Image (cartoon, helix red, strand yellow):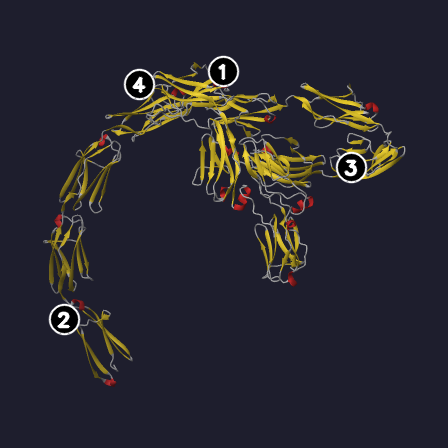
Amino acid sequence: ADPIPEVKWTKDGHDIDVRFTISSSNKDVQDGLKECTFTLNIPAGRHEDTGEYKIVATNKWGSADSSARLDMVFTPEIICFKDATGIPYEEVELVANILANPRPNITWLAGKKVVENNDHSIIENDTVAEMYKLTLKNLGTDDEAVYTVKASNNVGESSAQAKLTVHTEKPVLLKQLDSQTVKDYHPVEFKIRATGVPRPQITWYKDDQKLESNSQLNIEHTTEGQACSTLSIAHFSPAGVGQYTVKAANLAGEAESSAMLKMAQIPPSFGKTLDRSVDLAEGDPLDLKAKVDGSPMPTVKWLKDGEPLVPSERVKISVAPDGSVRLTIDNMQPADCGAYKLLAINDNGESASICAVAVQPEARHPKFTKELSDAKALEGEPLKLEAQVVAFPTPEVKWTKDGHPLRASPHVILSSTPGGLVTLAIDKVKPEDAGSYELTVSNRLGEVATKAKVEVGQKEKKPSFLAQLQPVSVVEGFPAKMEVKVSGHPPPKISWFLDGKPIVPDGQHIKIVDGPDGLQSLVIDKASPQDAGTYSVTVSNPQGEITSQAPLAVTARAKKDVPEEPPNFPKGLRDAIADEDNPLTFSAPFLGNPVPDVAWTKDGVPLEPSSRISMTCDGTKVGLEINPCKAEDAGTYGCRLTNPLGEAKEEAKGTVRKIYQRPLFTQKFNDLQQLPNYDAKLTGRVTGVPKPEVTWYKDDKPISESDKYRLKRDGDTVCLYVQDCCPKDTGIYKCVAYNREGEDTCKAELEVVDKLERKPKAEPPMFLKKIGDCEVFKGMTAKFTACAMGYPEPEVEWFRGNDKLFPSERIRIERESTGLLRLSIIGVDPTLDVGQYRCRIYNPHGEESCDAHMVYDSLDIRPRKPIGEQYVGFDKYQKSGAPLPLSDRPIISRMTDRRLTLSWNPSIPIGPRDPVTYQVEMCELPSGEWFTARTGVRSCACDIANLEPFRDYKFRIRVENKYGVSDPSPFAQTYRQKLEPDPPKFMPYLPPGIDFRPETSPYFPKDFDIERPPHDGYAQAPKFLRQEHDAQYGVKNHNCNLFWFVYGYPKPKMTYFFNDEPIEMGGRYDSSYTRNGQATLFINKMLDRDVGLYEAVATNEHGVARQRVRLEIAEYPEFLQRPDETIVMVRRSGRIEARVIGVPYPEIKWYKDWQPLTSSSRIKIQHIEPDLCILIINDAITKDEGLYSISARNVAGSISCSVMVRIEESEADYGYLTYSKGRNIKPKT
């Protein structure tokens, strides 16, 4: 090579060992080349030096390489071969590391025996790693020996020995078995752990018999770490009693442990006893369950009334291994009543559980054997409604009148007897007692109802004069009229007399005209001197007769002491104005002698007297009255006076204001679909003057109020409710509204369908609020706001003049889902933005627009659009002159059972107006109609009387003036039913010293009569529960019940005594003794003579018990002093006081805003004997303001009273309102 190359030696691709030395030499050869010799020296060659050696020579012209293999040949060398220890049944490895070249032949020897390669001994040779392994599987004790490994090749041979030791340990039980005593059917478990090498096998024995897992016994072995075994018995039984042994064994030996398993000896007991009592209806199945306990598990036996129960098709008895016991009897009959006893017996004793089973007679749906009958009574007479009902269980009885619940009161007596006779009695009926009465009787099976209509006739009344005859003076030849107004029942007969002689009307000269409300008139066409005299009228009916008399004077036409003169009108005839249907009256004084003839004309046409037209002349004044007047009576009226000396004529204009309007449906109802069993509602609004009458029709047939149809009217709103719709209710429903001016009709179709069809809603757009004028300064933001409605939701466009506006940086157009529309113009420039703005809304059903002006503010006064005109509906009030409605609901400031005081905020005028008055409307809940209770109220408060106690009402206010009536205010509602406390409870109790054990005590059989004792030792003489008070109370003229609670075994027989005299049942007395131990004595319509001592005597075979109670007459609660309205200064104390009496003393409860009040840190409730009730409010706060009520209740009834408590924050106003300090008034200087 030329130049001399660089060389690199490698072994098997790796750098050579540092032990190696490298040498080189070179010499020149032909052509300038050099011959180079490179030598690698390996000192003391070793086995690991065997490999592939390579030399690579490199110069700038290229490279060359050469390789050769070096093998180190030597006798096998055994480097590592160690002793080993193994565990039986496991495997062990003997490993030898043998270095040799060439590869050796390996021979394994166990002692002197050559080891063959098989399943027990596996020989593995890894010639690459030069590792040689002998693996012994399933090691046994015979494998223990000295093992020799021999390695030989053509160079030589070597060997090595290692000892294999098999390690064993005898089994050891870490814990011995413990003897156990276990209850029958309880689980039991033995656990054992054992150590040993190899791991021992565990075997279980019972009484020397090997045990295997089965359905009753389970053996489970685990081998994690130590050897573990568990023997478990899920349900121990007598067959499991015995000696249990466990053995642990391996190659080295065995270990064992034994224990006794015994049965616990426990007398029978009950884990779950029978129910103490069971109440069944006839035909129901009986299902009694219990769970017995004991060891050994007891056997069971069922007894009924001491006799064994034998299983049959009806009677089934089952016993489960866990002690669950069940008795079922199908179709229970009254004969199956009795004491059912369960006996549990084993060798250690017995135990019993008893259930008292009562089978009630078959429950009966309520049924009337005698229904209510319609009744008629005269005012002041007694009224009685009776019905006979059969039902079981005893039904609940409810009375209603015109849909409102009826309660017993001094006026209304409600009673029901054990025999099922239900009675409503009123001693003295009043006109308001007339109506529809309904009796509803219900129990758990259902309810039935019966109705009766009660009519109260007017009491016969002696005739009386509401207006007596008055003296009349008339000029000869002119009409005369004498009137009388009478009342009486039956309607009286009216007879007229002149100077004691009967007057016979001829229909021409003398007429008798009947008017409304008992008014009767005697009209003389042209009075003459013969008609003068004393007129009398006699009014008579069966109750009596009365007379009134007055003179009629007929004056001559010519006055002799006055000079004659022609007629004239000194003051003329004045125009007259009247509302339609009211009297239109003209009158004028005149002069003239003789008295002139009078002729009246209308629009030049002579008028003649008639039933509507009357003409009068008393010698100094003429008159014309048209009553009632009509629209066509408007015109020019003339009066001509004529006598022999001349005539005079005057004219006047008669105006009749048209106030009546024909009915008009301003809101019509539309076609309606409804699902079956739901209610349908048709609602419309109709206007008209006078208020139209409304009639409903279905398919042109009239509809009246019934269970199917409910008619309701509230102001202009008319509603028809079709209740519980069914297919036959489908049809055309029509509402006809009519008055004297005409009629209007609205109709729609009702369909009863299984699925409602969604119809698109159509509603044209409308402004609820229009945009208003806007005054701006330069640079400010102008805003126009409107509120619109419609469906679909209307689109919106804004215009300035005729130019449409679009959103920009200065112009913002906003629209909210609530219908609010807003146009905002930022940085107003008067030269560009001032002008008229218009908002247009539209949808497929129509469009509407409104406009307003943007005005640049200056000192000039410009008229602005009133804000009221921006709101829909305002024009109705503006045009009609009717006042606006009140925005707030009225306030109940004081209330008693029969009356309340209502107050409200005054009506705020929107400008000059005529004075207003108020109408108070009320509505009876739950379904009453609104009606006007008071009208023409000038102040902002009024009293409402004749309320029904504890009945709820709604109240609202309308504002009225001569132009019309406003819409109603929001309503205020009472919740007086919440003020009625629960009736007093009768609470008997046991005397001191009695063992109170309701589950086992004979005093508490809990709704069960034991027919026969279950065993001889069970007996109890009668025992009365002690009553809290020795007096009971009844209400005079009402039915009275006296109660005792008495228990005994067998069931006692009851007798009763009044003032030590025995009471015979029947007539006014009846009695009952129910299964719950309650004995009741019924007294029909208690009187004063029934007051005294009543004794109940209970007798059975084991003894007699007596208990006395004193019956007294209860008196209704009464307020001696009602609470007053109170004003309390904030952060101070206030108090409400009332004085209440009653026999027995009533229970007092306080309420605020219809919610009960109790004593607290700030609210204190006190009662000071004998009758003072106080509510104190400490540290008053604003939320203490409200309506406070006090309610008093005893057995006779309940009363309540409510007053307003106001919290005042201003000390000056507080002093003024409470009269404790006058207002500080400072005069101007």
**Residue picked out by circle 2:** 44
Report the number of numbered marks. 4
Q: Quadrant of residue 825?
A: bottom right
Q: Which marked residue is nearer to the observer: mark 3 or mark 2? A: 3
Q: Residues within 10 Å of mark 4 (few under 14, many from 20)?
A: few
Foreground residue, 534 or 364? 534
- Label 3 sits on a secondary structure element that is helix
Can the viewer see residue 752 in this picture?
A: no
> Observer-nearest residue: 60 or 224?
224
Q: Which residue is mark 4?
A: 1016
Q: Which residue is label 3 attached to?
A: 632
**What residue is pinned by disc 1?**
1067
Q: Amino acid at mark 2?
A: Ala
First along the sequence among labels 3 and 2: 2
Q: Which element is circle 2 on?
A: loop
Q: Quadrant of the N terminus?
A: bottom left
